[in-house]
Every structure is written in structure tokens, then in C-alpha cells.
Amino acid sequence: MNGYYSVKEVIEQYIAGCRTKMGMSAWNLIGKAILAGMMIAMGAGISSVAAHTVSDVGLARLAAAVVFPVGLMMVILLGCELFTGDCLFALSVFDRKQTTGQYIKLLCLVYIGNFIGAALTALLISLSGQWDYSSGMLGAYTIKVALGKVNISFFTGIVSGVLCNILVCAAVLMAMCAKDIAGKLLACFFVIMLFVTGGFEHCVANMYYITAGLLANANPEYTELAMETYGFSKEYLDTLNITNYLVTNLLPVTIGNIIGGTFCMGAPLYY
């Protein structure tokens, strides 16, 4: 196996690396998590540019899926901390090297940092004028994407989150299996392309998508264009609010991501 590490070797490496993570200060973890949130948000925001004029749903998702994986590529190669990938920290808990309390603490710190980074990127993109592309259609599309996310059922959010993080954690571990940069990038690209094309829910990406939708929804030009283009009513636009953001989407999706990474991917591979 000259070209790659075995899964067993990678899991052992990951467990060893968990001790290093726990030796970092809270501010270091949050700082690295902010960068990861920004990188995922860049992938999410620019994938919307690729997809916003494509009318066919499948092709639009495929167009977005070709761009979005660059976010995770940057996270992995630069060693930043991403909540969904860090759900694999449970491997160290299963191995009795770390405690459940340390696992929860790590995830909370990384989650906070990811949120800051993703929301900040949404704000910066809103100020960049990017949403004026296609005579404001990108702004309207940004609202559409966010509305779709805040109007899913709680159960759907959990299940979609599970499916998403099975694939994200698979991409992380496969990238670790590769010994060269090309292998790491290819592992990220194809697996993440699969999850984006499937339309599964990723909590950190949603921190960008929904924050961006809220910001775009505050622009009358974009909201009017969204109503004209997509047939949205004012009442439907009003469902894009903080409560639905945090409770209807982010809560179930986060739960699903934890289940997917910890119990559907981490536990089976460890045991």
C-alpha cells in the first residue's frame, strides 16, 4: 500500500490526533473553526453562482456540486476545524483516550467558530455586490435556497443531516488515506459532489445559506424578484426568520450530522 494508508492506520492516526486537539486552547480551536466556516461558506456561496440560472433541479445541483467541494479541500489541506468532520472525535471516546465531556466541549467550540466564520462570509458576500449578478437573480436565488431549508420538517432535517455527514466523514477519512495532495483532493471532490447533488443538509453550509438568505431577504429588489420569478407569497417569504433558521433547520440538521458522523460512520469503523 505505497500510495495510501489503510483505514485501520488512518483511524489510529485520527485517534492520536485527538490528543493534539485537546491540547489546544479554546481560542485556537475557535480561530481554526472560524477559518473552516469561512471556507465552507465560500464553497457554498460560489456554488450558488454556478447554479442560479440553471432551471433543471438536477443539473443545478450538479453545477453546485462541482464547485462546493473546494471548501472542504481547503479545510483539510490547511488543517482547520470543521464541526461535521470533528464528529469523528468520537473515535477517541470509543477508544477511551478522551471523555464524552471533552468530545462535547470540542464540538461546541468548533460549532461556535464555524457559525462565526460562515455568517461573516455571508455578510461580506452581501456587501460585495455579488448577488446583483443576472440583474439580481442571484439575490433572489439566495432567498429561494434559504426558504427551502427553513421549511423542511424536523424529521427530514435529521435524516438528511445523517446522510450528509456519513458522506462528509467518509471524505475526511478517505482524504487521510491518501499520501499525496492529488489523492486528498480527489477523495474530497467526488464524495462531497455526491452529497451536494443529493441535496443533503450540512449544518455549517446552512449557517451560510440561511444567513445569506436573511440578508438577501432584507433587500426589496431581491424579494420582489423572488416573488415574480418563483411565485413566492409575502407570507412564505416571512417564514425566512431567525426562529425557523435555528429551530426548524439548524437544530435537526445538527442532530442528524452528529448521528451520521458519530454512530453511522465513526462507531462502525472503530468497532
Image (tube, grey):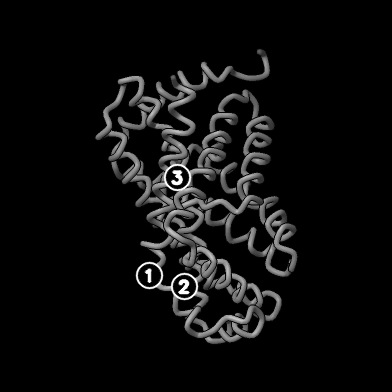
Residue visible at 36% across and 62% down? Answer: 247
Q: Quadrant of the N terminus?
A: top right
Earlier-in-chain disc, 1 versus 2: 2
Q: Residues within 10 Å of mark 1 (few under 14, many from 20)?
A: few
Residue carrying label 1 = 242
Q: Nearer the viewer, residue 145 or 76?
A: 145
Mark 2 lies on a secondary structure that is helix
Residue 10 image offset from top left, x and y in percent:
52, 21
Residue visible at 41% across and 73% down? Answer: 241
Discs 1, 2 touching: Cβ within 8 Å: yes
Q: Amino acid at mark 3?
A: Asn
Q: CA distance from mark 3 to mark 2?
A: 23 Å
Task: Tell me if residue 90 comes above or below residue 159 in the rendering.
Answer: above
Q: Amino acid at mark 1?
A: Ile
Q: CA distance from mark 3 to mark 1?
A: 21 Å
Residue visible at 56% across and 27% down? Answer: 176
Residue 214 image label: 2
Q: Amino acid at mark 2?
A: Leu
Residue lying furthest left: 101
Residue 257 image label: 3
Earlier-in-chain disc, 3 versus 1: 1
Q: Nearer the viewer, residue 30 or 213?
A: 213
Quadrant in which residue 119 is drawn: bottom left
Residue 46 image offset from top left, x and y in percent:
63, 60
Mark 3 lies on a secondary structure that is helix
